[in-house]
Amino acid sequence: MKIRKLQRKMDRQRRTNNPNNFNPNGTVKKGSKRWNKSNRYQKTAAKKREIERKQAAQRKSSHGKLVNQTLTIGKHIKTEKVSVKAWQKNYGKSIGFKSPASFQSELKRKAENAGGTVLMFSTRKTALSQTCLCGNKQKKSLSQRVHHCSVCGLKMQRDILSAYLSRYIDPKTETLSIQLARSGWLGMEQSLLDGWRVGSNQSARTAASPKSPTIGGTELMSSHSIAREESESARTDETHVVSWNPLHSYMG
């Protein structure tokens, strides 16, 4: 908002200082022109640059913290190959401010420096957000954040399920192994359900507090389906009673 006000102020100052460079309808005349920049215009431009510098520094710091948090979980990362340009067309300046492409580059750089890898797989081949553990695929609108399968009845937060499925993407073929995903589900279901509950509570607190930070683990999960390759610490050794068994549903 401050940058927008300063941009409008700069435009008014430029028009006042250079009336001969504009047409009667307010558009800029074609051809080469000489622009007169007053002292007030330069001060306004300096204020705008300072705000942009602070925003860039804050964005870089937030990206660095989020990348470090991700790499504490595991250094082998899998993420969907999303089109940032398409996001910019749909969401405009908000995408430019958060700069997801810069985050991806920083994540890849730090992961490779730590001896890890970042696999970016095609969303068209995998369609993780549309796929269920039973193999059923059903299209969802972007506003539908909970996956509820009409075939087997599995209910899970959409992005968390996509992140889990990405764990079983073959890096060579970029295809999903449903069989492996089903076999590993019983050991992960409780952890994923707990993550869903924690994420829901965090979203509720964020909605109640407008000043809460907008960059965190929940937002990362909604933008990138990240799964762990080697670390098994999130798996539970205890036996849990589960409400849904993908193996039984599949066999039946």
Image: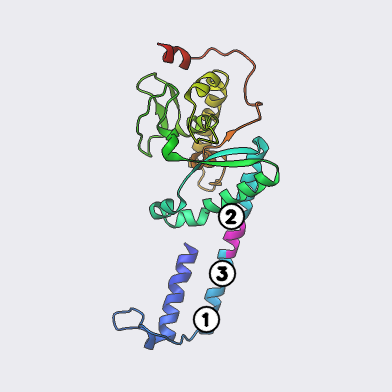
- Circle 2 Cα neighbour tier, 10 Å, few/some/many (<14 / 14–19 / ≥20): some
Q: 247 or 68, which is in the foreground?
A: 247
Nearer-N-terminus badge (3/1): 1
Q: Position of residue 164 (x, y in %)?
A: 52, 29
For label 2, the SS is: helix
Q: Find disc 2 in the rendering and name its residue.
A: 59
Amino acid type of the residue that numbered disc 2 sits on in the rendered structure: Arg
Does the magenta segment cover residue 57? yes
Q: Find disc 3 in the rendering and name its residue.
A: 49
State left or right for residue 230 relative to residue 165. Answer: right
Real-space Cα separation, disc 2 to disc 1, in angstroms: 29 Å
Real-space Cα separation, disc 3 to disc 2, in angstroms: 15 Å
Instruction: State the residue at coordinates (49%, 65%).
Output: 3
Magenta range is 53-59
Amino acid type of the residue that numbered disc 3 sits on in the rendered structure: Arg
Secondary structure of the magenta portion, mostly?
helix
Q: Find disc 1 in the rendering and name its residue.
A: 40
Instruction: State the residue at coordinates (45%, 66%).
Output: 4
For label 3, the SS is: helix
Q: Position of residue 85 (x, y in %)?
A: 44, 54
